[in-house]
Structures are given as structure tokens and as C-alpha cells.
Image (cartoon, helix red, strand yellow):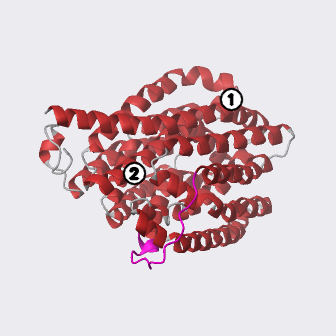
Amino acid sequence: MKPITLARQFESTALLRGMMWLGSAQILGRCVRLGASVALARLLTPEVFGQAALILTTFELLATLIRRITSVTLIPMDDEELGAHMNRARGINARACQAAFLLMSLASLPLAFYYQDNTLIGPMVLMASAYLLQPLGMLHAALNQRRNDMRVLGRAVLWQTIADGILTTVLALLGLGIWAIIVPKLASTLVWAAVHRAAVRPPRPSARVGTQPLARRGIETGLADSAVALRFSIDTLLIGYFLGIQAVGIYFFAYNTALGISLGLIQSFGIAFYARLSGTARGRASGRAQFLGGLSTMALVTWPLILLQCALAPWYLPLVYGQQWIDAGALPIFLCLCLSALVRPMGEAAGQLLLANGLSTANLIMNLVFTLLLTAAIAMAGRWGLVEVAAAVLACHLVGMPVMAFYAWSRCGLPAAIMKGNALPPGDAS
């Protein structure tokens, strides 16, 4: 039993260390972003927040489709396979980002027509330009994640967030409105790419022709990631449809203040968890024994923070962001969304476990089913009001996230003995 205990302690410590590098970068960056969010909340109207929400939501939906289109396959490869796929990965990344730029630029036209607001077109096209900058760092970011170098990933997140937050604050104070939110996204993308490029040099392409279908798994993973992003943002889109752009602005404010830190930590957990599982797959053939340890580690990190946020919300929301948001009804929305973060890591862990075991199709189906159910719940609640939408989001996550975790658990064949904490699967005790 002693070797098993030591193995579990090592894996939990390694995962926690990776999470802490990324999570601390998220928290430090959030401190910088706090100044920007305070300036935006006090200088911009709910209508401008609504415009920003639509633009950033559209951007994120397409970004998640292409973000891991090659990295999810490159990370588990051995060195020889990696060299064989370098040039192909560069080409796929570039074409995917160009397609995303074109799609978002075209999407600006029907959105502007629907909301009768032609001022959406210019910011959306400029925001889409960020896709064209992403290939500068996509391959390098995948290599840093493959090396499990969470320090570099943390630095990239931190400096990107700092650049975004400082520039946003300056431009907001200069009175640039929606442009104060959009322009910094492009500049911070360059910062992110520069940090990753400085840390690693891609290996020379090998002469051997790769046989692994590089794009297929990436497309499936991208579709699953898009389903995840859609469930993060479908509430924003449906609120805009049912309740109008001002309601979008109020909800977008509550969403970002409630989940800004939590989602950053959850994303850090997902990156560190997948890198750890993939590294285990290269070395010992299975990383499934880390599933419970990863979830418990994430709960220890996030639950105290989330509960503290809820307890202090009636005091610090009006103090920091202004009484006008409380008067607009943001507090109960904030509390519902904040509490939903308690179980969101379960869905993240479930997806990463399926991906690490080569079950990208199962991951896609799982996320699509939950997203469809969430969409139906929000569509029904959206007929009554914002608080009802937030309550529906909370209820769906409280039920759906544990179900997703159990599905991934059973789909990957975890034996019942591990559920009781009595044994590791074959091959994981070595």
C-alpha cells in the first residue's frame, strides 16, 4: 500500500504544482484586470457591454474550434512522430485561423442587421483579425504544454492578461468605448505568442512521412471545445434574442464578475490535467487513476474562493463596481452563476479524461448533449427574465456536471475498486 500512496501523492502534487503556476498567473492577471473592469463598469453603459458580449462570444466560439486543432494530437506524440508532423501542423493552424477570420467577419453582417446596429461590423472585423495572429504562437504553445512546462504557460497567460488589462484601462479612460475592449485583444495576442516563442524552439521536421491523421482528432476536439464554449455563452446569445442588448450587458457584467477568477482556474486545471494525463499515457499507458485526485485538488483550490465570493458579494459589488449594477438586478444573477462554478471542474475533468484515453468522439457527444439540454432550459427560462436564466444555468450544472464525470469514469473503464480508493488500475502502480 505504501508505494501506491506515494504514487498518488506524487501525482497530486505534480498536478497541483502545474495548476498553481497557471492559477497564480490567472489570479495575478485578474488583479490587473480588476482595474480595467472597474473602469469599464463605471465608464461604459449596459448597451456597450452588450455589444462587447456579442463580439467576444462570437470570437470565443470560433476560437475554441481551432485552438487545439493540432495540439491535442501533437502533445502525446513521441519525438520522432512530432518531427514528422511539424510542417503539416503549421499549415493546418494557418488555414484554420484564416477560415475563422473569414467566418467571423461575415457573421458581423447578419448580427448588425438583426440588432439594427451597424456599429457592430467594424469592431467585429477588427476582433476577427486576432485569429490571423494566433499561428505565431500556436505550435510553440503546444510544445510547451507537451513538455508540461506550466511556468511558461502561466507566464504567457499572465503577461497577456496584464497587457490586455492595462491597455483596456487606458483606452477606456480616453473615452474610446467599445474599441477600448477590442483593440487590446490584438495586442495581447502578440504578447502571448512572444512568450511561447521565446521559451521553446520547434524541432526540425523529420524526413519520415507522418501516418497519424493530424487534423481529424483536432477537429473532433475543436467541435467538443466549441460545445463547451457554447454552453458557456449560449445564455448570452439567447438573452440577446429574448430580452435585448441591454439585458445582455447586465448579464455579461454579472457573468464576468462571478466567474472571471473561477473559470480561469478551471481552464488552468484543464490544461495541467490534460498535460499530466498525456504524459502518463506516454510513460505508463494510463492516467486514469488521477481522476479523483484531480477533482479533489481542484475542489480544495476553488470551493473556498467561490463561497467567499458569494458571502461578500452584497458588500463588494456595489463598492467596487457601482450601485447602478445592483439597481439593475445583477446580484442574484451573480450568486447563481458563482455557485455553478462549484461543479464546473467535473465537466472539465471528464472531457480531459476522455481525450487522454483517445475518446475524442465520446467527448464531443457528451458535450453536445449537455449543451443542447442547457440551451433548452435557458430558452424556456429566457421568456421570464435574467434571474430565471441564471437559476436555470445553476440547476443544469448542478445536475449535468456530476453526470458527465460519471459518464467519463465509466466510459474509460475505471474499476469499482478505484472508486473506493483501494487500488490503482493495472500499470499505474509502477
Secondary element under disc 1, as helix, strand or loop, is helix
Q: In screen coordinates, is 335 left or right of 47?
A: left
Q: Which residue is drawn at 44% across and 72% down?
A: 214
Q: Can residue 167 be seen in this view?
A: yes
Q: Residue at x 48, y 77 (%)?
A: 207
Q: Which amino acid does label 1 sit on?
A: Tyr
Using the rendered view, name the quadrant where residue 186 is placed: bottom right
Secondary element under disc 2, as helix, strand or loop, is helix
Image location (x, y in percent) of residue 231: 47, 54
In the image, residue 90 above or below residue 224 = below
Q: Which mark is residue 73?
A: none
- Give the farthest residue toward the right: 174
Q: In front here: 413 or 232? A: 413
Q: Residue at x 15, y 38 (%)?
A: 420
Using the rendered view, name the quadrant where residue 307 is placed: top left
Residue stretch in magenta:
200-217
Q: In screen coordinates, is 1 left or right of 136?
A: left
Image location (x, y in percent) of residue 352: 37, 53
Q: In screen coordinates, is 416 left or right of 46?
A: left
The tag earlier along the polypeptide, 2 or 1, is 2
Q: Mark 2 points at which residue?
A: 274
Q: Name the residue under label 1.
A: 321
Q: Which residue is drawn at 54% across and 36% down?
A: 261
Q: In front here: 311 or 67? A: 67
In the image, residue 210 above or below residue 173 = below
